[in-house]
Structures are given as structure tokens and as C-alpha cells.
């Protein structure tokens, strides 16, 4: 019975209970980027903060707040302050606030720093929101629907998988190289010398594996020109969703025009 | 025949992306003062041609930007490296050590110029990592903004790209001949190693 329900779950589009998660991946990206574009046309840091808050709200609406907030804070709290501090300390300007040696804090630098730090928060928001609300399989499927070749989908998905696989292999290779006496600690030159014996078996092994995989995949008609089947597929975009996305785009375009005119 | 070549490329491009990622991490693990996060782009670009190199660069940039959002703005640099690696390899660079150092220097120079242009126009001359601090220190000591953007980006890129090219060379040296036969740029390396 369990097996049957599992199999049946692949007979219809795989939907979740959340309306935001069910949107077409490309439509999601469209909305996020349109929101992000606002920052370019309003040169106020307050606008950027509001948009960041909108992204957090979207994560809440998608029911992914927990998986969103921790990577977002980790990225945002490193990148935002970095962008701010570098500009605040070093940017040359007229209105000097504090000056000691090379440290040169000016009002212009602080304004610029806040501006850029908040823009980076928006960028982090877009990227983290994409990773928590979009599955890579769904994204590649919807790209195929608009005409991207399935080879590209394969490359994207297999890159993501290979990163994980090769990371595991790295640890194995590092341990085995250490056990045959290659030093991985010590001064800089010792450590540089250790780099090649770790990376080259990894890389060469992967290349020779690729040749075998080519043959295996060819035997399974990967290079066939016939239309592909999909195990996991998306629902056709409902009219309501299309209207929503177009409305959001028009609204944001209106805001931008308003902002430029004012 | 052509189809099979395509097949191998489809598998090599993800390897390039993953090696970029893992190479950068090994450099961090070994506490090296270099990034070494473009070895995959260099190697795959060199053996499989500019087009494959560009794709490796693009996919690497997209997957790195999940953990490192500021690299998204340097996507042109990532693609430029793949393109240059493919082009230079076709011209016979990457076949001997001196030529490889030359290739690394050329790529460091060109990527450095484009990187400093991106930093200058998008980020007011501050790089997005350690280069930003370096550029900042230069600005603080009175160097004009454009000059500090160029100096900080170029120096870091050239210092990083030459060792990257050397590692790529060592790996290419060890790729078996039967693999080269199937690769677009393979004949360059086969001819060079025959002598």
C-alpha cells in the first residue's frame, strides 16, 4: 500500500500545500528580481530595508522562515557590515568626522556604506529566498519548458550533485595522502606542496569516471533526439498565477516610474 | 563521432564546476594564502575549448553565489576565464611550464582589468573580499579611487592566477592520451607531448 501511494504521487504534479511554493519557479524568480530592481531606482537605504523585510515576509508566507532566516543572517551579518565598514573607514570625502592615519571617516563614506550594505542585504535576500523556495529539479524542468536543451538541465543538476560527491572524496584522499606521509600542516610551502597531491587524484578520477558515464548514458539513449519524459513534473501555470505575476510586475514598474519622476 | 564528443563535454562541465568549488575549499583547509577556486575553469576550458570554459564559469558563479552572493556581480570574469583558457590552450599555451606561467599572467592581467572595472563601476572601487580592504587602505593613504581599485584587483588576480594555471598544467599533463583523443583541444596537447 505504501509503495502504491508513493508511485501514485508521481502521477500528478508534485504540489505542496503552500500557494507560494506552488508558483512556477520562473515566476518566483521574476517576482524576486522585480522587487530587487526597485533598489536600483530609489537611492534611499530605507527602501532597501523595506524590500528586505518583504523578502522575510515572503519566506514566512512560504512557510520556510526557519530555513530562510539562518543562512540569511549568516550571509547578511558578514557581507552587510563588511560593505559598510570598508566604505565608512576609507572612502574619501569632504565632511571629515574622524581622521587618524589612514582611517578617514567621512559623512559621505558612511552614507555610501549604508546604501551599499542594505543593497547587499537585498541581494542576499533574493539568493537565499531562491534557494529555500525553489527546487533545482523544478527550475530545470521549467527552463526545459521554455526551450532550454535538456543537456543544460543535466549539467546544472549533476554539478550540484558532484559538488557533494567530490567533497566527500576530498576527505578520503586527504586522509590517504596523509597516511602515506604527505604533510598537510606546516609552513606555507609545505602546505602548497600538499595541494596538488590532493586535487589531482580527485580531478583525474572524476575525468576517467566521466568517460565511463558517457558510455553508460549513451547506452540509455541520453543523446537521443526524441522528446524526453519526466518523472517529476509541474502543473501548467494557472491563469490566476499569470495575472498575479503580471500585476506584480506592472505595480513595480509603476513604483519605479513614480520614483524616477519624483 | 561529434555526438559522442558532446556527451563527454556534458560530463566534464559539471566536473569543472565541482572542482572549482572543492579546490577553493582545499585551499581553505590547507590555509593557503590563495583562492585557487578557478582550477576547474582553467583545466576544462583548456582541454575542452572556450565554449565549455564559459559554461563552467557561468555555472560555477551561479552555484558559488548561493554561499557568496557578491560573486554574482563578477559573472563576466568567471566566463572570461573559461574563454581565455580555451583560446590560449588552442594557441599552444599550457603545454610547457614557462608558457603556462605566461598564460596565467595574461589571464590574471585581463581578468584583473575587467574585475577592477566591475569593482570601480559597481562597488565604488572596493573589491568584495580582501581586495576591498587593500583598496581601502590605498584610498586612505591618498591614492585616487580608480588607481587603488586597479592596483588592489590586479595584484591579487595575477598572484592567484599564475599558481592556478600551474596546477591546471600539472593536471592536464596527467590526463591519459585516450581521453585527449575525444576532446576538442586534445590534438594540441597530443602533438605537444609526442615530441
Image (cartoon, rainbow, N blue to C red):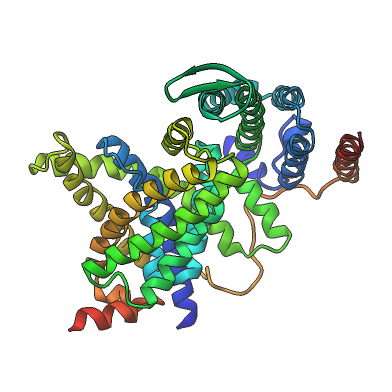
Place of residue B175 in the rendered image (x, y in percent of width and height, measured from the top left): 26, 67
Quadrant holding the C terminus of chain A: top right
Place of residue B190 in the rendered image (x, y in percent of width and height, measured from the top left): 27, 80
Task: State whether residue A77 appears in this view.
Answer: no
Place of residue A2 in the rendered image (x, y in percent of width and height, measured from the top left): 58, 35
Q: Is residue A106 left or right of residue B45?
A: right
Quadrant holding the N terminus of chain A: top right
Q: Is residue B125 left or right of residue A126?
A: left
- Residue at coordinates 26% horizontally, 73% vertically from top-left? B95
Residue at the extreme left: A181
Q: Is residue B194 left or right of residue A67?
A: left
Count of marks, rendered view: 0
Q: For residue A42, what is the image quadrant? A: top right
- Residue at coordinates 34% horizontally, 49% vertically from top-left? B160
Place of residue B6 in the rendered image (x, y in percent of width and height, measured from the top left): 48, 73
Task: State whether residue A145 appears in this view.
Answer: yes
In the image shown, does B57 or B150 lie closer to the viewer?
A: B150
Q: For residue B123, what is the image quadrant? A: top right
- Residue at coordinates 50% horizontally, 51% vertically from top-left? B115
Q: Is residue B176 left or right of residue B89?
A: left
In the image shown, does A194 or A95 lie closer to the viewer?
A: A95
In the image shown, does B144 or A192 lie closer to the viewer?
A: B144
Amino acid at each position: 500500500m505504501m509503495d502504491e501511494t508513493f508511485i501514485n504521487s508521481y502521477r500528478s504534479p508534485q504540489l505542496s500545500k503552500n500557494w507560494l511554493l506552488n508558483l512556477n519557479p520562473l515566476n518566483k524568480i521574476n517576482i524576486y528580481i522585480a522587487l530587487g530592481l526597485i533598489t536600483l531606482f530609489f537611492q534611499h537605504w530605507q527602501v532597501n530595508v523595506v524590500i528586505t523585510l518583504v523578502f522575510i515576509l515572503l519566506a514566512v508566507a512560504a512557510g520556510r522562515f526557519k530555513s530562510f532566516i539562518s543562512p540569511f543572517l549568516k550571509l547578511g551579518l558578514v557581507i552587510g557590515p563588511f560593505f559598510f565598514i570598508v566604505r565608512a573607514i576609507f572612502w574619501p570625502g569632504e565632511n571629515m568626522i574622524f581622521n587618524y592615519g589612514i582611517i578617514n571617516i567621512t559623512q559621505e563614506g558612511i552614507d555610501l556604506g549604508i546604501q551599499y550594505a542594505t543593497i547587499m542585504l537585498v541581494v542576499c535576500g533574493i539568493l537565499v529566498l531562491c534557494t529555500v523556495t525553489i527546487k533545482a529539479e523544478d527550475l530545470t524542468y521549467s527552463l526545459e519548458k521554455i526551450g532550454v536543451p535538456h543537456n543544460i538541465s543535466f549539467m546544472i543538476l549533476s554539478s550540484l550533485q558532484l559538488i557533494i560527491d567530490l567533497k566527500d572524496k576530498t576527505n578520503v584522499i586527504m586522509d590517504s595522502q596523509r597516511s602515506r606521509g604527505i604533510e598537510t600542516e606546516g609552513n606555507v610551502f609545505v602546505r602548497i606542496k600538499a595541494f596538488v597531491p590532493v586535487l589531482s587524484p580527485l580531478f583525474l578520477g572524476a575525468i576517467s569516471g566521466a568517460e565511463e558515464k558517457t558510455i553508460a548514458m549513451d547506452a540509455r539513449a541520453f543523446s537521443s533526439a526524441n522528446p524526453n519524459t519526466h518523472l517529476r513534473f509541474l502543473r501548467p501555470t494557472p491563469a490566476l498565477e499569470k495575472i498575479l505575476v503580471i500585476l506584480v510586475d506592472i505595480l513595480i514598474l509603476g513604483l519605479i516610474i513614480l520614483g524616477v519622476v519624483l | 563521432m561529434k555526438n559522442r564528443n558532446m556527451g563527454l563535454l556534458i560530463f566534464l562541465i559539471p566536473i569543472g564546476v565541482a572542482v572549482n568549488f572543492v579546490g577553493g575549499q582545499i585551499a581553505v583547509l590547507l590555509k593557503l594564502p590563495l583562492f585557487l577556486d578557478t582550477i576547474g575553469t582553467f583545466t576544462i576550458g583548456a582541454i575542452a575549448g572556450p565554449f565549455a570554459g564559459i559554461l563552467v564559469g557561468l555555472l560555477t558563479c551561479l552555484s558559488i553565489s548561493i554561499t557568496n552572493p557578491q560573486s554574482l556581480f563578477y559573472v563576466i570574469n568567471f566566463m572570461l576565464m573559461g574563454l581565455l583558457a580555451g583560446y590560449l590552450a588552442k594557441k599552444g599555451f599550457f603545454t610547457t611550464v614557462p608558457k603556462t606561467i605566461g598564460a596565467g599572467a595574461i589571464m590574471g592581467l585581463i581578468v584583473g582589468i575587467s574585475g577592477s572595472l566591475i569593482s570601480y563601476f559597481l562597488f565604488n572601487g572596493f573589491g568584495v573580499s580582501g581586495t576591498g580592504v587593500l583598496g581601502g587602505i590605498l584610498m586612505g593613504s591618498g591614492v585616487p579611487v580608480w588607481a587603488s581599485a586597479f592596483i588592489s584587483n590586479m595584484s591579487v588576480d595575477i598572484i592567484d592566477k599564475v599558481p592556478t594555471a600551474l596546477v591546471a598544467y600539472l593536471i592536464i599533463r596527467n590526463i591519459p592520451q585516450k581521453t585527449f583523443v575525444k576532446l576538442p583541444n586534445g590534438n594540441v596537447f597530443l602533438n605537444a607531448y609526442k615530441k
